[in-house]
Image (tube, coloured by chain):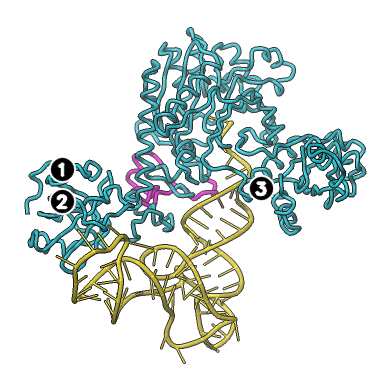
Amino acid sequence: METGKLKRTLSGEINESCTGSEFNLKGWVMHYRDHGGLIFIDLRDYAGIIQIVFDETVSHESFNTAKKIKNEYVISVTGKVRTRPEGTENENLETGKIEIEAKALEILNECEVLPFQIEEESDTNELLRLKYRYLDLRRKKMKDNLIFRSKFNFLIREFLNKNGFFDIETPFLTKSTPEGSRDFLVPSRLNNGSFYALPQSPQLFKQILMVSGFEKYYQIVRCFRDEDLRADRQPEFTQLDMEMSFIEQKDIMSLAEEMFAFIFDKLLNIKLNLPIKIMDYDDAMEIYGSDKPDTRFAMQLNTVSDIFKNSSLNVFKDCLSKKGVIKAICFKNGADLLSRKDIDELLTVVKDFGGKGLAWTKVAAAEEKLKSDKCSAHNAESIYIQKCRLEGGIAKFITEEEGDILLDRLKAESGDIIFYQADSKKIADMVLGRLRLYLAKKYNLISDNKFNFLWVINFPLFEYSEEEKKIVAIHHPFTAPNAEDIELLDANPLIAKSQSYDLVLNGEEIGGGSIRIHKPELQAKIFEILSIKPEDARLKFGFLLDALSFGAPPHGGIAFGIDRVLMLLRNEDSIRDVIAFPKTQKAQCPLSDAPSEVKYEQLRELGIKVIEKDKHI
RNA sequence: GGGGCUGUAGUUCAGACGGUUAGAACGCCGGCCUGUCACGCCGGAGGUCGCGGGUUCGAUCCCCGUCGGCCCCGCCA
C-alpha cells in the first residue's frame, strides 16, 4: 500500500484544528492495543506521540496489516484526524483529544523482541542500556536530554557569535605534554616511534591564536584525559573553550555570566541574578571547607580555636599546642534526627574522610523555669535562646562560659547538634567540608530546583606536592600571578595568588580560567619555581614560548565543562545521561566494544609491539 | 592501586539452615475481545542462578579465585 504520497507530518504538528484533514505520519509503534475489531496504536516520532485507530469498517486492508504489527515496528500511516469520541480523551497525551483514523498503512520495518522495554523511567541495568544505546535513546528522558544539549550548544554559539567570537578548530593530533593528566597517545605511522597525544584541552593553541590576533576565540570541543572515571568524569568530554585578548579578569567573568543568563533565560525561562557572587578561595576553604562551595544550604564552618584556648579536653589542647585549629559546624535541628548510633556511624564516615575523630555536642534548652519567667514575648524568646546549654558528647569538658560564646558564634539553638574537628587547618576544613555535604545529602537539606552560581577567585598560584617533593602549579603553568604578588615569587611563592577564577554551580566546578602570562621573562620565572629546567620547558612548550616572544597580547580565557552543566540543568546524577554514547567506568564502550585488540599487521605498520603490562621489556 | 555495593527467566526483582519441580511482575508466543491508552480475559513457552575451582552424598546458596557493572578515595595542571 502506497502511503507516501502526502508529505510526512510530525505528531507534534497535529492538533484539534487539523480535524478532518488527511496526513501521513511515520514513526515507531510505542504501544499496541488489539481489541479484536479495533486496533489502537500509539505512534511515536521525535516530536511526540499520537493515537492511530485501525477500524475494519474504515479500511479492511490496513486493518489486516495492522494485525501483524508489534512494538517498535516502523510504520507509515495515512489517515484523517478526528476528535476522539466523548469520554475517551487521554489527558496524559498532548494529542489526547484527537486520533488518526487509519486509511492506509505500510510496515516500513519490523523489530526483533527488545532486550529491554522502552519506558519513560528505566530501571534497566546501565550496561545493557549502553550496549543497546540506540534503544535507550528512544526513551523520552534521554531524547529530551540530547535535544536540550543541542539547544544549549546552539545558544552558546548564538551568544558568542553575537559578541564577536570566532569559532576556530584546533588539532586533535597534537603534542604530548606530560604536565597534568595522562595523555591518550596516538602512534604515528609516518614517524616510527613517535606519538601524538589527544589534547587534554586546546590550552596552548588558543593562547597561540591570541598571538595571531584573533582576539576572541571559542570552540565547543572534545577534550581527552586518560584518568579514572567518575559519575561526572568521562575520558572524553566536551568543553566550551574561550580565550580573549586585551582583557581583564572581571571582563571575562562578566561575559561568562551574561552568557549563562542568556542561556538560562532562553532555555529555562529563568532570570539569573547578576552579578554572580564572588568568593575568595581562602574564604571558601575557611567557611565551606571546599574550593567549590555548595551554597544552597548554610551549615558553615566556624573557627572556634580561640574559645577553647584553655580547654580541659586533651584532644583540643594537644591540637592547639601543635598549631592546629578547632572548627565546628552546627547542624540545625539535628539533635533529634541523629540517634547515638547515627553519630557513631558518622565517626566512621569522618575517618574515611581523613579525620582523626568526631567530637559532638547537642544543644538543649535550659531549665524549664526560665521559659516561664514573666516578661514580654520578645524578651522571653531572647532569654530562651541565650539559655541553651550543651549536652552529650564532649559537653562535660566545655565550661559554661566557653559554651555561651560558642552557641552565640554558631547561632546555635535548642535542638541543634554541633560537630567539631581539631586538626591542621587543611584537614579540619576538608573533613568538615565533606561532612557538611554528607549530612546535607543524607538529611535532604538541599532544596531542589535551585541554581546557585558562585565565582571562586584568588586561588594560590602554587602548592607544594608532598608526592613529587616540589612546587606544582594549581591551575596550569601559564596562569598569571596577581600583579601585587609578583614580588612574592622569589621569597615566598607559595603564598602568591593567581589571576584565576572558577565558576561553581550547586557545589560542582563547572568552569575555570585565568589571565595568562604573556611575557616570556615571567613565564621563565614560573618554570624556574616549578623546577622545570629551561631546556625541558623548550622541549615541552617551546612553540608557546616562541609565540610569546613575538608580540603576544595580554590575554586570558576560561573553559566550561558542558557535560557537567547539562547534568545539573537536567537534574541527572551522571554526565553519562547527557552524553549520547558514554563509556563505562573501565572506559569501555559496550555498544561498539571499544577499545579492542588490533591486527598484528596494523601494529607492525606502526612499529608497535604489545608487551604484558608490568613486565620489563 | 584501595574501599563499598552488586550480578538469579528477555527485563526488574524475590528466594532457600546446603536437599525433589528456583518464583512474581512486565515482556514474549497462541487464542478471545469495537473505545482502549501500562487495555482486558484465557492458555503457554522461557533459567549454565556471571565464570572457574574447592568443601560436601548433594552448591544458585558456604569458601577461594576471576570477570563485569555502579558509587567513592587516590588520580583528574
Residue A206 relative to residue A80: left or right? right
Kindly report the distance in space between the C-alpha atoms of the residues bearing marks 1 and 2. 9 Å
Which element is circle 2 on?
A: strand
Kindly report the distance in space between the C-alpha atoms of the residues bearing marks 3 and 2. 54 Å
Between A548 and A577, which is closer to the camera in this rendering?
Answer: A577
Residue position for label 1: A8
Q: Amino acid at mark 3?
A: Leu
Q: Earlier in the sequence, mark 1 or mark 2?
A: 1
Q: Position of residue A532 (x, y in %)?
A: 61, 23
**Colour chain B is painted in:** yellow
- Look at the image and say whether residue A93 sits in the magenta stretch: no
Q: Are marks 3 and 2 in contact (CB under 8 Å)?
A: no
Q: Amino acid at mark 1?
A: Arg
Q: Earlier in the sequence, mark 3 or mark 1?
A: 1
Q: Position of residue B70 (x, y in %)?
A: 50, 52
Residue placed furthest toward the top: A551
Residue position for label 2: A76
Chain ID, mark 1: A
Residue position for label 3: A439
Which chain is cyan in the rendering? A
Q: Which residues are magenta?
A: A588-617
Which element is circle 1 on?
A: loop
Residue at the (87%, 42%) spot, across then down: A374
